[in-house]
Amino acid sequence: MKDNIKISRPMVDKNKVKFKLNIPKELKKFFKDDLFWIKYGEPIDKCPEGILNIPPIVTIAPIAWASGTTVEIDKIDYNFSESLKKVQKAYQIQYPDIFNENVPEIKYKKKKKYTPRKNQQNTSSVLFSMGVDSLACYVKHRKESPALLFIKGVGLDSKGQIKLEKKIKSFSRNEKVPLHTIKSNFKKILEEKFLNIYYMKTIDRDWWGAIHYGTGLPSLCAPITFINNYNIIYEGSGYTEDPTYPEAQPSFVNPLSWGETKVRITEVEMTRQDKIEHILKNHEVMDSVSTIRSCRVEKSGRNCSMCEKCRRTIVAICVEGANPNDFGFKVDKSELESIKNNFLNRKIILTVIEKNIWEQIQEKVQKKDKEEFYFPNSDFYGWFETANLDRFITTKKNSHYLKKDLLDNMLFNLPYPTDIYLYKLLILIWMNLKKE
């Protein structure tokens, strides 16, 4: 008989809440720590326990479902517990190789319906990072004056977090909307390498991208939405053109709810290029946008202007007739020629999804008068208009796309903690070899 994952009662100190995790031995390889914590930018000590418990459950439950383990918790919100059944079922449909139907539900001692104070007006909120998806989401719902929910620390170092937070604070002041900040170890607590080795072999993406972030990010905001009576969290869609693609899909994100708050993925019908066009056409918001955060490489909060994602965003902005330098990039006309040469020299290689996004930009180039573009006299546009982008698809998977290899198989078959020790030893050896 398997041991259960046990989540302690929340330990609250004004704006910070901690949970002690009791992890079964066979699952310890998936966790770097046994303490889950969240720090909010405001006091949450008045928030009921059944709502405070939501963030750790949402991060841990998919691991429990994948491994056939039960999660134990003391109190749980009624609406959340009902929604979690739908989330679980949706994961099973989306990823049948990972989640089967015979998965135990959450085990709790008390279930209660929690409702916010009625003297507060219902309002909306947006998960906000100043990226394309979140900006388009905000613009779409701007008439509601939605509060901004900023999750600090995802993909940035400490200086980058501070820099980005300053920009988002400036944006909230200009837009006259509330800003709530949240920081947590919800991502760092997981040993994603082992989750990927054990569960993602048949999925063309990692645990974070396919399973965790879509539900994990909004769940961190549960106490904030309850205290402030936000009845909806809008989460900007990623790549949702293909409902079978391993991405935060509406099928398993939209069922998520607690108290009187619902989560909704929005703008699923819009391409990335549509979103950039939508942002740039809403001039009322433009005075507040100092940066369109794009970079997946730079940890300092800036755009590097050199990675594939930065470069495709630069071209996308130029095609809409705007200056990329106004939105956090550093480029001149020669940059477009450099992008063309990097394609031709295969310094830019694309996944299928990246190719699809470049094709969205290409369609705009084919339809529009080149005089409307920024840097209109660049030779890049004539070349790009007819370029066969299939030539630039990589034959290898991206480094975070995981397939079976010798090391994975060896780690998979070793018992805990031998697998952890061997993994850390191999990483140490690899780092030393790189130095030589």
Image (tube, rainbow, N blue to C red):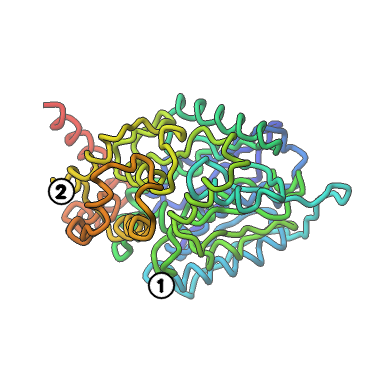
Q: Is residue 396 above or below residue 165?
A: below
Q: Position of residue 156 (x, y in %)?
A: 43, 33
Q: Position of residue 240 (x, y in %)?
A: 45, 63
Q: Is residue 251 above or below residue 129?
A: below
Q: N-terminal of the two: label 1 or label 2?
A: 1
Q: Position of residue 116 (x, y in %)?
A: 80, 51
Instruction: Give the residue pinned by disc 2.
Output: 344
The residue nearer to you, when weighing 5 against 267, is 267
Farthest right residue in view = 119
Residue 332, picture quadrant: top left
Tally of marks: 2
Question: Judging from the image, what secondary structure is the residue with disc 1 in?
Answer: loop
Q: Is residue 13 above or below residue 55?
A: above
Residue 314, picture quadrant: top left
> Dot 1, crowdedness within 10 Å: few (<14), some or many (≥20)?
few
Say whether residue 394 is left or right of residue 211: left
The residue nearer to you, when weighing 20 against 96, is 96
Residue 107, picture quadrant: bottom right
Quadrant showing the C terminus: top left
The three-letter code of the residue at mark 2 reads: Leu
Disc on res. 96: 1
User: Which residue sits at x=30%, y=40%?
Assistant: 307
Farthest left residue in view = 436
The residue nearer to you, when weighing 186 against 230, is 230
Say whether residue 47 is left or right of residue 317: right
